[in-house]
């Protein structure tokens, strides 16, 4: 058991230390804000949404997560998207604020030729483009947000 824990700790440390640092936070000047909160990106293209598959439960979600001290919500969305989906984005307009004060921003990829890959091998097993209408509500990490995801995609 001790050997298993040691191997796990070494693998965890290695995976965390190999994360590429996020590029400079890019925010569309028309939407710049000083709000500090947890946040994520809604990235769409031709009816598809960029999502990550959670390693722990194989559920889908938009990239996003917890802010760091002093980090704006927009820069949290930017950094988390870089870490989870491996793409550099420009953070645009605020699309929705959830009841837990998680901010969802419309983001656009700076280089669409960038291959999809996660910089977070612990949390993310896959980065992919999906049409959420072709998935089940139960395939989503936050299934109660499924209707909003469809609504936002249809509004684009």
Image: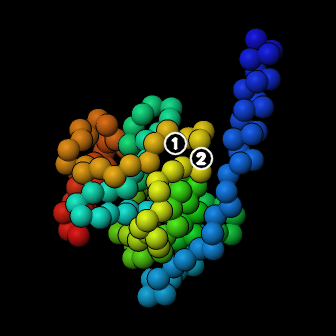
* Pointers 2 and 1 in contact (C-beta within 8 Å): yes
Mark 2 is surrounded, within 10 Å at the Cα level, by few (under 14), some (14 to 19) or many (20 or more) other residues, namely many
Side of 7 where 44 appears, left or right: left
What residue does disc 1 label? 124
Can residue 70 be seen here?
yes
Give the quarter of the figure containing the N terminus.
top right
Give whichever of 33, 60 is nearer the camera. 60
Q: Secondary structure at mark 1?
A: strand
Q: Is residue 14 depicted above or below 98 in this figure?
A: above
* Residue 148 point in image, percent of width and height: 26, 56
Q: Is residue 38 depicted above or below 19 in this figure?
A: below
What residue does disc 2 label? 120
Residue 19's disc number: none
Figure quadrant of residue 154: bottom left
- What is the number of callouts on the image? 2
Give whichever of 107, 93 is nearer the camera. 107
Q: How far apart are the two marked residues, 2 and 1, measured between alpha carbons? A: 6 Å
User: Which residue is painted at 30% across and 45% down in the image?
Assistant: 144
User: Which residue is painted at 61% across and 60% down in the image?
Assistant: 67
Figure quadrant of residue 59: top left
Side of 16 where 109 appears, left or right: left
Can residue 65 be seen here?
no
Mark 1 is surrounded, within 10 Å at the Cα level, by few (under 14), some (14 to 19) or many (20 or more) other residues, namely many
Give whichever of 137, 51 is nearer the camera. 51
Give whichever of 106, 104 is nearer the camera. 106
Figure coloring: rainbow
* Residue 78 point in image, percent of width and height: 54, 66
User: Which residue is painted at 46% across and 70% down in the image?
Assistant: 111
Residue sitting at the far bottom: 30
Q: Secondary structure at mark 2?
A: loop
Q: Is residue 31 depicted above or below 3 in this figure?
A: below
């Amino acid at each position: 058991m001790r050997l298993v824990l040691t191997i796990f700790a070494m693998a965890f440390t290695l995976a965390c230390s190999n994360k590429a640092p996020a590029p400079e936070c890019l925010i569309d000047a028309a939407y710049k804000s000083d709000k500090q909160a947890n946040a994520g990106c809604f990235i769409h293209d031709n009816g598809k949404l960029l999502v990550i598959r959670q390693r722990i439960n194989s559920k889908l979600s938009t990239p996003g997560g917890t802010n760091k001290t002093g980090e704006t919500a927009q820069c949290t969305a930017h950094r988390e998207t870089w870490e989870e989906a491996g793409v550099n984005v420009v953070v645009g307009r605020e699309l929705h604020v959830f009841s837990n004060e998680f901010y969802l921003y419309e983001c656009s990829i700076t280089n669409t030729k960038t291959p999809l890959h996660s910089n977070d091998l612990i949390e993310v097993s896959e980065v992919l483009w999906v049409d959420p209408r072709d998935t089940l509500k139960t395939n989503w990490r936050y299934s109660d947000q499924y209707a909003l995801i469809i609504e936002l995609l249809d509004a684009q």
